[in-house]
Image (tube, helix red, strand yellow):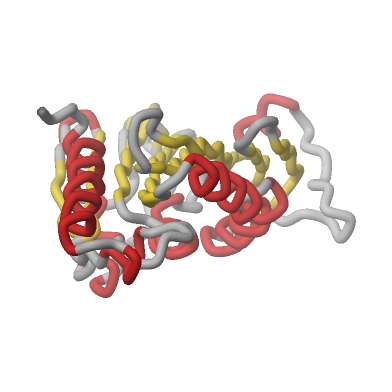
Amino acid sequence: MPRLKLHGFNNLTKSLSFCIYDICYAETVEERDGYIAYIDEQYNANRLTEILVETCSLIGANVLSVARQDYEPQGASVTILASEGPVTPNGVKPPQPESVVAHLDKSHICVHTYPESHPGCGVCTFRADIDVSTCGVISPLKALNHLIQQLESDIVTIDYLVRGFTRDVHGVKHYIDHEITSIQNFISPEIQSLYQMVDVNVYQENIFHTKMLLKAFDLHSYLFSTRLQTLSEARQLEIGKLLCKEMQEIYSGRNMP
């Protein structure tokens, strides 16, 4: 596609938001506590920073600053301020002539984690909320496959929207600067083959929403500490139903009887 010749900076803001869920079953209270501790360590602020820095590289953004925090009793947050242009060797972007221009040139990527367990049964859920927001020509859509693969993703809900407008050299306003009919257009065929997917889009508002649910279900992969061989067939069936119900409820966004 030919590039659109713009007047000044590209003022469109492109925002990609994920909710990524990992579901697990822990038989006892001690195992549930162990799962939360495992997730808290597996996805601590340092590990999340590594994932987000790699994401910045993939979308062509340059890291300006990183803020990260682990929480008690669990959870972590990381926010990265990024720019489209280059940075100096010490990681600082050269000063801009006007602070407003510098602000417009910045993008950000952040993640917050939410490990939790069901109070009445052994179902445990880990959720990671990720937001990638960019201005200019860099696109957060390039981060899709990387983030889905980096986090253990049983269920993924994705929102993408383009806000504001930018002008071309003739003064005409443009409310989007790239073709898109679905978020699925930017997800690899390999990943698409693994998930049941559905779209809810509002094309005239440049709002796109995709939900993904992992197709394959192997109970062994969802047990934390508990060995499959120690469970009777009836108990395996019961746990499988619990987990499938949990995933269907999250996927559909409503509780089921």
* Residue drawn where x is 72% and y is 39% of the image: 68
Q: Which residue is at the front of the view, 127 or 156?
A: 127
How far from the left and from the top, in percent, is residue 61?
61, 54
Q: Please state, as top left, top right, bottom left or bottom right, where the C terminus lies in the image.
A: top left
146 in relation to 30, above or below: below
Does residue 212 show up?
no
* Residue furthest out toward the bottom: 190
235 in relation to 216, above or below: above
Answer with the quarter of the image where residue 95 lies: top right
How far from the left and from the top, in percent, is residue 23?
36, 49
Give the total number of marks visible in the rendering.
0
Q: Which residue is at the front of the view, 215 or 103?
A: 215
* Residue drawn where x is 69% and y is 30% of the image: 72
Does residue 253 show up?
yes
How far from the left and from the top, in percent, is residue 89?
86, 60
Q: Which residue is at the front of the view, 124 or 11?
A: 124
Q: Which residue is at the front of the view, 221 or 229?
A: 229
Q: Please state, as top left, top right, bottom left or bottom right, where the N terminus lies in the image.
A: bottom left
Horizontal side of 254 relative to 15 (left or right) equals: left
* Residue furthest out toward the right: 90
* Residue drawn where x is 48% and y is 34% of the image: 11
* Residue drawn where x is 65% and y is 31% of the image: 73
Horizontal side of 49 relative to 3 (left or right) equals: right
How far from the left and from the top, in percent, is residue 103?
66, 30
Horizontal side of 73 relative to 251 (left or right) equals: right
